[in-house]
Image (cartoon, rainbow, N blue to C red):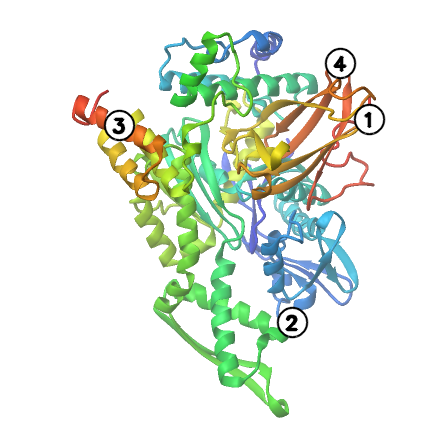
Amino acid sequence: MEPVIGIDLGTTNSVVATLRENRVEVIPDERGNRLHPSVVGFMPTGEIVIGHAARARRHVDPKNTIYSAKRLIGQSIKNPIVRLAMSTLPYQCEEGPNEQPLIVVRGRKYTVPEVSSYILAHLKRCAERHLGAPVSKAVITVPANFTDSQRQATKYAGELAGLKVLRILNEPTAAALAYGFGRALDAKLAIYDLGGGTFDVTVLQIRDKIFEVLSTGGDTFLGGDDFDRTLVDRLAGEFITRQHVDLRNNPEAWSRLTTACEQIKCKLSQEDAVAGTIHDLATGGGGKPLQLDFEVTRGEFEQLIAPYIDRSMQACQEVLVAAGMSSEALSDLILVGGSTRTPLVRRRVAEYFGRAPQTRINPDETVAYGAALQSAALVAGGLDPAKFYSLLLDVCPRGLGIAVAGGYNETIVERNTPVPVERIRNFTTSKDFQTEVQIQVSQGEARQFTDNERLGVLALHGLPSRPRGETVIEVTFTIDGDGILNVKARDKLTNQETRATMKVIGAPEREGEGGPPPNDLLPSPM
Amino acid sequence: MSERVRAAIQQFVDRAYAALDQTDYYRVLGVSSAATEREIRDAYYKLAARLHPDIHGDDAEPVFRGRLTTVFSRVVEAYKVLSDRRKRADYDVGLAQGMLRMTAGLKIRPRAEEAITDSNARKFYLLAQKSMADGDGRSALMNLRIAMSSEPDNPVLREAVARAEGMVKGGGGRGS
């Protein structure tokens, strides 16, 4: 049987794994590295390098070395948080169709899914080399609170890399699958997942091989990169005071400083203070090379990052309330993501949940491990008890609503509803002989429509021309196992299918790919 | 893979699909109207292990898969309502009047907590609800006092305090 793989497509690093002979193997690159930097380097020769080879180019050629693409994938470039993230990236972005950010490298424009597809194709090649067989199916993980368009864009990146994406899997859920593998459990778990750029927290119940997610929440813009940035801001501020040079205008220096701060952060996990010098960081008056001397104590660092950790604790409380549970009812606490190595994070999380975290888990690899398990489970099915690996009952992390009269939002699917879920709503025409209805769709459950994040516009086309109110269109909203919305519409009078298109903001446009565009599920009217 | 199991599930799904609009949530889950929370969860897990689309692999036939999704989605809907005390009570009222489903966002009447505007107060109100459901009136009162500190005049909170106090008096903090 053809091997299937699980991929943790991270902001900073990615991991790929597979289940072979009932054991999970983490797949190395040709040099034996198990952690693959999520970096794509565009060389002057036109060659594209990925992973470790690309990371080495980050401060040699910052404008043409793309990292943290996950922070941009499936996002609207109009989103203020995206704009903030972009302001710290040394490479150039511009607005593309459907509000998508485009990355401009050496005069060519790339969509974010294209850039991510290079990373995925690299992981696919690593797997094929390691397994000595072609690989065409994968499970790819995303943060639990990724939006519809972020999921669509990630799935599309997988397809561009030549992979059939069996499932877009939530990262904390993947960690739970890894935790529960091969053990008979009746347990309630909390998973605190702080990665490079995103934060998730999930509460879930495991009984035997059934994994039921009770609630999930988090913050798509919170992670270790923010910790780095607080250090960068501090050291760059000191540099202005001492050397009167603003590094913000110097992408190469900024990129070197960012890398240095990432290392300082990691060292501060072991040491109480880190001091050193960055040589030749910039040039001063008369071409004089300038260096940056620094000393950072752990206490200072903890003060800088405390507000970010506070934000994550708030999400933990919301998730416990949504699960209708107190922390005492939990049987275990799992920490995932490289940023949970930070001592202050560990301390605060342990304090909040009132227990020490599980330590037998490798925070870098556990998500890919769970993805590999889920890929095996999906291919095997589960009707045959011998092949029943696990059944995952996951939820949609966000509500789904539509705009109704008065500027209100009507919830169609509540957040934390198990997927797949199907909901039916009827819509009617309000004007005589109206042949098209447009419905604004949101992700969120706030009363005012505009308080929610926009998802996009659902359009019902080619409606029969009748007096107002006579046409009733029944729309079926389905959130599938990937957490992606699909729509289908039917004229109640004639019982015929009607064309419905869902245009999702920030999602990739897939025209000319041979397949149907996303969410344009009906091949043709009638 | 046992073909017999597959055929039996297929038959079950076809029948459930055809009867979906005449089936109440208890029958969807195959439990009695007096079922406990644990029995409801067990029934859900058992059905999920048969009807979840993932169990049928990535090569299931599309029409069957569509029906499976519809039927499983209804199982989930039934589970979400019946496993939530308040929603279940609302549902029972509707069911007595012949309403088999809770549509419109699974709400028959607006939920009480929506009358609480402060988000912190709402959180503690929900925690208090949970404590009361567990028969712990004392914890409920504590949570409600925190909630009242942000919205002292909220009638929903006042009413809940009265209920929690009744609980504490009636059974020394435990029992109803």
**Disc 1 vs disc 4: Cβ atoms closer than 8 Å?**
no
Give the chain of mark 4: A
Q: Are marks 3 and 1 on the same chain?
A: no
Alpha-carbon span between mark 3 and mark 1: 57 Å
Give the chain of mark 2: A
Q: Position of residue A445 (x, y in %)?
A: 53, 36
Camera sees residue B64: yes
Residue displayed at 76% across by 20% down:
A497
Amino acid identity at mark 4: Leu
Q: Earlier in the sequence, mark 4 or mark 2?
A: 2
Give the label, 1 or 2, closer to the camera. Answer: 1
Alpha-carbon span between mark 1 and mark 4: 14 Å
**Disc 3 vs disc 1: Cβ atoms closer than 8 Å?**
no
Give the chain of mark 3: B
Q: Residue beneath label 3, please?
A: B162
Give the chain of mark 1: A
Q: Which secondary structure, mark 4?
A: loop
Alpha-carbon span between mark 4 and mark 3: 52 Å
Give the label, 3 or 2, closer to the camera. Answer: 3
Residue A60: mark in rendering: 2
